[in-house]
Image (cartoon, rainbow, N blue to C red):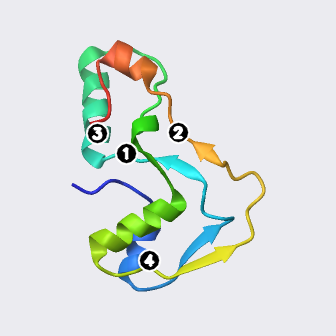
Amino acid sequence: MLPALDEFFYPTALLERPVRIFGNGKQVRDILYVTDAVRAFHAFYERGKPGIYNIGGGPDYSMSLLECVEYIGKITGKEPVVEFEKERLGDLLYFVCNTAKAEKELQWRPS
């Protein structure tokens, strides 16, 4: 099962094109498996509790962009070429979902 690491990193690495990272690559993102996203939508549908829910991997399933690129290299067997660019204004250094509400009200958590 492959996590949804980054919608641009996978195809770029597979096509052997340079992966662009803005900043130093230490930015952290949580990782969500597609099957977990489907389970979250199903839980929302089944339980019918209206509201806004954070659906993501949470702290247990997070990694830096550099770790993400390294992981993609292991999966694909191709070492991605990384091009670093100036960090973008407003880019979040840490973006990890708090899934506590979904866990409590939908009985859902990432696996």
> Going by the picture, which residue comes out furthest to the right?
89
Using residue 9 as the reference point, say whether residue 104 is left or right of it: left
Q: Disc 3 on helix, strand or loop?
A: helix
In whole angstroms, how far apart are the C-alphas of marks 1 and 3?
A: 7 Å
Using residue 95 as the reference point, say whether residue 107 is left or right of it: left
Q: Locate residue 47, reporting x and y percent.
A: 27, 15
Kind of residue at badge 4: Thr
Residue under circle 1? 32
Residue under circle 4? 12
Tell me if residue 14 comes above or below residue 50 in the rendering: below
Check whether the beta carbons of the residues at disc 1 and disc 3 lie within 8 A of each other.
Answer: yes
Check whether the beta carbons of the residues at disc 2 and disc 3 lie within 8 A of each other.
Answer: no
Quarter the N terminus occupies:
bottom left
Q: Disc 2 on helix, strand or loop?
A: loop
Residue under circle 3? 36
The crowd level at tag 4 (other Cα within 10 Å; few <14, some 14-19, many 20+) is some
Residue under circle 2? 96
Quarter the C terminus occupies:
top left
In whole angstroms, how far apart are the C-alphas of marks 2 and 3?
A: 15 Å
Kind of residue at badge 1: Leu
Check whether the beta carbons of the residues at disc 4 and disc 3 lie within 8 A of each other.
Answer: no
